[in-house]
Image (cartoon, coloured by chain):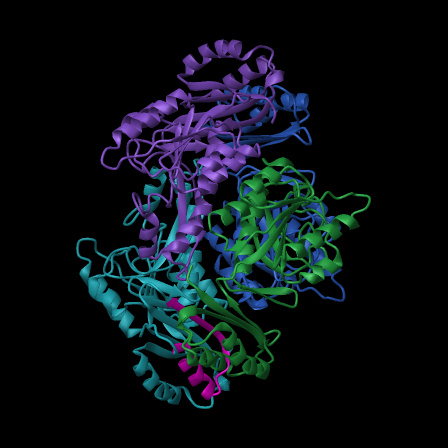
Chain colours: A cyan, B purple, C green, D blue
């Protein structure tokens, strides 16, 4: 993977933003390997993602940041300059189901996902061996249905201890407390096992089966306090028919879930997902 | 198209149904060109569709029906024997939008849909010339928003006059009175411009845009008294992104709508769609 | 449709292109509604498409072109500034099959394709009425299998007479002479009824049927002197199975062909397709 | 998984086959959970797959086979009665790439693939630990490029020793000797990393990149002596664009490869794939 810096910005739209930013990049020798722009006409908002060869820049990242600050202020930008070489720390929360986590771990193990996974937290013990085979600590935090607060607190404590930059709910199946959602706004990714907004809440495959839909899907989104209502990052579907039982839907859905979650996480890790309001811009 | 008879049956499941029916077919010389079976474990119901070469049968259709009746009664079957050569009469209801009806008319005109279209009814005049070019009568029935009942009555009257076997709502955009729904139960096909059950009701593209979904879809279903809740025949989706405005969604969605409606109607006309409860078995 | 100017450029990659071009745009007041960039690492080539609100520019198009020329020369650019309001003249060549041309005509008629269609040329008479209903002249140019040259000459003559900017082969089924290909390089679009490079040449559905593929497809590409080898603009596929006869493949394939051709043409008309070598960059 | 017997037959088509077979099944109390039929008009061949609840049969499997033999002979059937409870022994051949084998092992480990995997054979050591974690023996058989015959012989010897019913080439990347192909005709499954027949042979992703295709695919097929020419079981594709490098194609293709191979193997293990000539009937 080429070493780059990613200059991610979004701000109110006006004439000259691209000129100003790209002039800045060029002044510092920056060679663009990729550049993406989006002007949202509805909200009059402008989004940019510039990927710059690290060794083309004539000064260090911190100096670049310092130099860019006045421009950002002038345009009222939300912005960051991300070093592609810095591995984000992704804590994965799982439950009993293994398909999403096995998929993520294999992608990580085979260098398809550029990140560290400092630990996996689960409310079941069954995945311990698989996780530990990958050399990743496994933290067992059972959830008492009658009193979930201590488990939630423990999970949040562990997330802090392992210094998570990002939290992935790989079919964790627990409702995340509002405070935890806020702490990881735009950095906590869930996979929901339906094509949202269809079948919000529990048992989407049962609902899909009962409704007789001809496609089932999965949705990866950032977690917000509103259950299954956060900004959607990625969705996909698969065709089903009357021949499929509810168990078939569950089985077929697994393949969609894991693919959608992996694509969403990869895009997140490459800073391709910009959140604005309750929607995303995904520069893929 | 080969001349066949289609023996369509469904009934409570038990041992020996296939044996009994296929023995009956064989006894009368019936050569099967296609045979489909489905046992629904949940409802313990059995569905069959046998397509039989017409000229292989040793007796006429009415005689076959007479001979089959005792078997049907023994097994408690819903059934019919359909002559593939008999063109169903399909009345199309349209509004202002032309994409679905233009698509259906072209398929019909190029012999891809085997049916008669005795007339098109619309609450707008703009499609008259297109319809009449195809040699099909065009009936203009404007709808007074303040008093819709007369228009509905007129439409139902025309449907009866033109002896419709089947009614297609090609983006008609009017809510069909309950009594009309009941009269055409399992024979009135709608295209809804969303991936149901997402975005039920009006303005689904606006809702999809606001929610930021990454796929938009369309759903063809039989019309029932519950708006957008009838048995689903066919669905499909298309990928969209942040780059697409609401107008883009409308434009891209048209292609999905017309394809889904055409597939649903074709399957209906070939007696491939069996309704059971609020779900369909589609032997495609 | 908003009135814009599209500044399309491609050239050898180097630091500062985006800065230079976007600075130029900003200097003249240009408000970007869309901006796309692609750096091809393999060929070290840079591609840009800037869409600029027409009324934001402080000078006329010709003056902008004049002002841009020195920059284009400095960077060795292939470039053009296209007025989105200018309708391109698209001559369609068809044969007996109606699905692609009916689809294109309906999209044009319903303002989904922004262009003029000065005439349709065909070697069969059967589509005359459909074409003329749309108010478009129909030119019948039969092809003598024993001596095709006169027909080809006549087609090229008509194309010139009708001042075609772009030629679309909507299942024309004739091999285009090399000289005609060269005259319309990058402006003559074909739809091939297979997923190229599978099944090059004649009878692709028969070949697909014989090979037992599980998906069939269609490919839209610019025509070059090498049959079915030109730069690919768009492709798509549809699932098939053992249940489908060769006739079914032909029927199902039609839907893919017309959708692929329409998307390719639309992207071409919006100047979203940049050709480089034998490949395309499609900014869709 | 319900315990069933699968009666799989194919033979020249004639009137009465379904009647005769289903009568036989019913006579012995057989409750059909699934029944699939296909009449191939081109070759005049008939294919059936009947799935029968094991505990509904009034006699044992061997007795059923004995009783069915005369019918099979009368109709000239290829046939077998398969006990769904008997796990097939699947030997997997792999090379350095891990994505397909990791996917298959996880599906097997999570009971999604009903089979035994008596061993994995590879010409590289890198997958040993992953395979052994699953409790499966790992056999390392390096291939000397200058003299491949001994390695091929060793692989075939191991396949025999481990009593393989089925061999899966999970990106094994070696050409299988003709004699080995014949020994496992219809039981040796390969995954080819292109949408066959496009890009037969080596380096399909490089070829796809060079051709500028807009979709890449994968094909699972039975291995025959003709390289990449065997009967196709399953195919799928994924969309790519100018933004994707050859390395991106390789990465994106992995997801298609593993999904296609897993679906093909599952259908094979459930006796849903019937080979006839160089084509397959897949009752999925």
Residue stretch rendered in magenta on the structure: A17-39
Residue A28 among magenta residues: yes
Residue B235: x and y in percent read 42, 42
Residue B66 among magenta residues: no
Q: Is residue B181 visible?
A: yes
Q: Nearer the viewer, residue B174 or A163?
A: B174
Identify the residue at horizontal 47%, vertical 74% (top origin). C60
Identify the residue at horizontal 55%, vertical 24% (top origin). B51
Q: Is residue D254 visible?
A: no
Q: Nearer the viewer, residue A279 or B248?
A: B248
Q: Relative to residue A76, is residue B244 drawn left or right?
A: right
Residue B201: x and y in percent read 29, 43
Q: Residue furthest front?
A: C161
Residue A155: x and y in percent read 26, 65
In the image, residue D142 sits, relative to residue B240, either above or below, namely: below
Q: Nearer the viewer, residue C269 or D199?
A: C269
Counting labels gives 0
In the image, residue B163 sits, relative to residue A6, either above or below, namely: above
Q: Which quarter of the rendered picture does the N terminus of chain B lie within?
A: top right
In the image, residue C131 sits, relative to residue A186, either above or below, namely: above
Residue D163: x and y in percent read 62, 47
Q: Kindly indicate the quadrant of the structure image that contains residue B79.
A: top left
Q: Relative to residue B159, is residue B108 drawn left or right?
A: right
């Amino acid at each position: 993977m080429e070493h780059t810096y990613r200059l991610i910005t979004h701000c109110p739209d006006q004439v000259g933003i691209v000129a100003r930013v790209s002039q800045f990049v060029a002044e510092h020798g920056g060679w663009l390997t990729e550049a993406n722009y989006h002007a949202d006409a509805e909200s009059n908002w402008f989004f940019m993602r510039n990927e710059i060869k690290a060794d083309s820049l004539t000064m260090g990242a911190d100096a670049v940041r310092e130099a860019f600050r006045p421009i950002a202020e002038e345009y009222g930008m939300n912005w960051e300059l991300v070093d592609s070489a810095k591995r984000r720390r992704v804590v994965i929360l799982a439950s009993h189901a293994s398909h999403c986590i096995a998929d993520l771990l294999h992608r990580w193990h085979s260098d398809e996902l550029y990140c560290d996974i400092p630990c996996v937290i689960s409310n079941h013990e069954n995945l311990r061996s698989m996780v530990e085979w990958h050399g990743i600590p496994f933290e067992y935090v059972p959830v008492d249905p009658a009193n979930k607060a201590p488990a939630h607190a423990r999970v949040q404590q562990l997330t802090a201890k392992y210094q998570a930059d990002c939290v992935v709910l790989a079919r964790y199946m627990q409702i995340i407390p509002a405070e935890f959602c806020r702490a990881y706004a735009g950095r906590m990714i869930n996979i929901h096992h339906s094509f949202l907004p269809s079948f919000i809440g529990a048992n989407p495959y049962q609902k899909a089966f009962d409704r007789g839909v001809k496609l089932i899907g999965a949705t990866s989104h950032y977690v917000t306090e509103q259950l299954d209502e956060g900004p959607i990052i990625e969705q996909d579907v698969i065709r089903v028919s009357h021949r499929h039982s509810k168990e078939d839907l569950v089985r077929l859905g697994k393949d969609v879930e894991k693919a959608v979650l992996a694509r969403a996480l990869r895009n997140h890790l490459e800073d391709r997902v910009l959140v604005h309001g309750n929607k995303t811009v995904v520069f893929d």
